[in-house]
Image: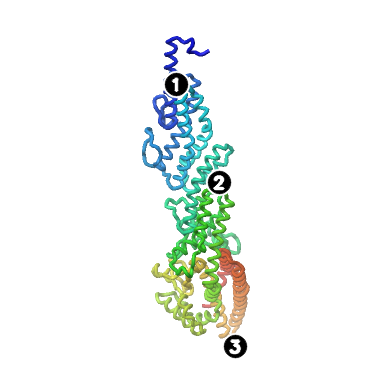
Amino acid sequence: MFWWLNATPDSCVFNVNQLKLNINMIHELLLALSGYPGTIFTWNKRTGLQVSQDLPFLHPSETSVLNRLSKLGSDYIRFTEFIEQHTGHVHQQEHHTNQPNQTGLHGIYLRAFCTGLDSILQPYRQALLDLEQEFLGDPHLTISHVNYKLDQFQLLFPSVMVVVESIRSQKIHGCQILETVYKHSCGGLPPVRMALEKILAVCHGVMYKQLAAWMLHGLLLDQSEEFFVKQGPSAGGAAANQEEEEEDLGLGGLSGKQLRELQDLRLVEEENMLAPSLQQFSLRTEMLPFYIPIRVAEKILFVGESVQMFENHNHSPSRAGSILKHQEDLFAADLHRLKQQPLFSLVDFENLIDRIRSTVAEHLWTLMVVESDLLEQLKIIKDFYLLGRGELYQVFIDLAQHMLKTPPTAVSEHDVNVAFQQAAHKVLLDDDNLLPLLHLTVDYQGKDGKEATGPRDGATPPQDASPREAPPTGWAALGLTYKVQWPLHILFTPAILEKYNVVFRYLLSVRRVQSQLQHCWALQMQRKHLKSSQTDAVKWRLRNHMAFLIDNLQYYLQVDVLESQFSQLLQLINSTRDFESIRLAHDHFLSNLLAQSFILLKPVKYCVTRQKDLLV
């Protein structure tokens, strides 16, 4: 019944030796599975952990089981090598080559991934410790017992290794790691899903910390360019092909570039023309995980930009107050609560982002509409950029005509501003607080670049003439700048003011043509008692036709476009308490001006310009 009852002395010695051999091999196996190969289990960088081939006492079935277990050891060793390579605080192992990170992978998200990976390896390490205790208590346990105890890791380790190899081979970086782990966690194997969700929760902890710094304090903590918010302009428009931009779409002379500018309510140029004191931020969309919608990312960007503006501004706190209404601690606690959740919930996440955004947007509305009197600022923009003060510009055109009909010189800008001040006094516009904020610019060939841009907000070279060519007249080089006060600069950015400048130059051209035609009519009235020739009659008929066109165009621009759109803008501002809604309404207002006034339609603009040139 029992082998020792009928055993001979020789067979007893054999079985004792076999038992000792079994115990030694089990200890070698456990050490190898812990990442310390020896003589029975050897390590090869290419093939991994393997059972030595020259062991005659192993049955082929035992070799098969041991090789199956060795795959776990191989994966574990590679996991620990990966963790050690990118964090440097994992148990050192004799066969590892402690070389610096040569893969190019780095960053806090990668370190968080390694931390999460290390945490899911802890049950495996504990299982090996438990096995060691069991074998010390019962030396007759077999290899099959080891295989049974570690069978739970046979599905987990290969699946996690796929994720690790994806990160290593594709050099996945920053928030892209979140997307990679999330995709692989959507499988149907519960152990794999739970382990990857645990890693993802650790990685999300980094994202929540960056979100708290950005949204609550305006700090972009992103040294390795891993976050989906970045400082600087978006790279979206940089790759556009020039021929593609200038392609005529057949829409009345509207080119592809112009159509994109018209449809894009916040032009790429806005990001390149910001004043040095105003930092610009944008989304790094390639870093945005696919399970976070772009609309949520844009809200995060808006909140951080607004808070950053307040944090960097040295205005009196009693006037500006806290943009988050002193709820920073409450929002920080809510972010921490989300961070503690084992699973990411988009609903909870977006609800919190919306709450923070609503708080910021409402405070900005109060600050801009109530405290900074946005409606009055819009009226100023309308009066000066959109020629609302028509009598002012009529006098200015008369005073500056002789100065600007020739190519500009170094003193043209000074002379034009003197004429502008004189015109203001003539129409009884003597606002000492307003006039110093307005300044006419004249760009001319050879003007120093720094002087051309100037220290004023919104001072940008006009688009009517190439910066490399001398403008034909001073009118072509004329521009208007307005020194926007804080915090209205976040609405009236330099690029927005440059778009207003485009409208300003166009409306001024139409007004000048109208003025010249009226001057021709005055000459006609002075000479009507004289005998006129057939040629004179043709000229006066031409003047009448031109005057009819320009007068109707002027009426259309001022009444059907400017007044109509401006009234709609004021209604929208008065009907909301959300700053983002105001900014969107203002962008629509400006884009509608560009579209409905035919500025981007080449035939119409050419017609007006041609008439102006004929009358000069």
Total numbered labels: 3
Q: Which marked residue is nearer to the observer: mark 3 or mark 2? A: 2
Return the mark for residue 471. Answer: none
Q: Position of residue 228 (x, y in %)?
A: 49, 53
Residue pointed to by mark 3: 528
Give the quadrant of residue 299: bottom right
| Image height of 451 relative to 211, above or below | below
Q: Residues within 10 Å of mark 1 (few under 14, many from 20)?
A: some
Specify the amino acid type for callout 1. Asn
The residues tagged by marks 3 and 1 sit, at their Cα atoms, a distance apart of 127 Å
Q: Residue at x 51, y 30 (%)?
A: 150
Q: Of helix, strand and loop, which one carries label 2?
A: loop
The residues tagged by marks 2 and 1 sit, at their Cα atoms, a distance apart of 45 Å
Please say whether residue 585 is visible from this viewpoint.
yes
Q: Residues within 10 Å of mark 3 (few under 14, many from 20)?
A: few
Q: Residue at x 47, y 37 (%)?
A: 122
The answer to which of marks 3 and 1 sits earlier in the sequence is 1
Residue pointed to by mark 1: 22
Q: Nearer the viewer, residue 472 or 370?
A: 370
Q: Position of residue 154 (x, y in %)?
A: 52, 32
Please say whether residue 602 is visible from this viewpoint.
no
Q: Nearer the viewer, residue 48 or 515?
A: 48
| Image height of 241 relative to 57, above or below | below
Pointer 3 with pointer 1, Cβ within 8 A: no
Q: Position of residue 51 (x, y in %)?
A: 44, 25
Q: Of helix, strand and loop, which one carries label 3?
A: loop
Q: Which marked residue is nearer to the observer: mark 2 or mark 1? A: 1
Q: Residue furthest bottom?
A: 529
Residue pointed to by mark 2: 343
**Colouring of the image:** rainbow
| Image height of 226 relative to 139, above or below | below
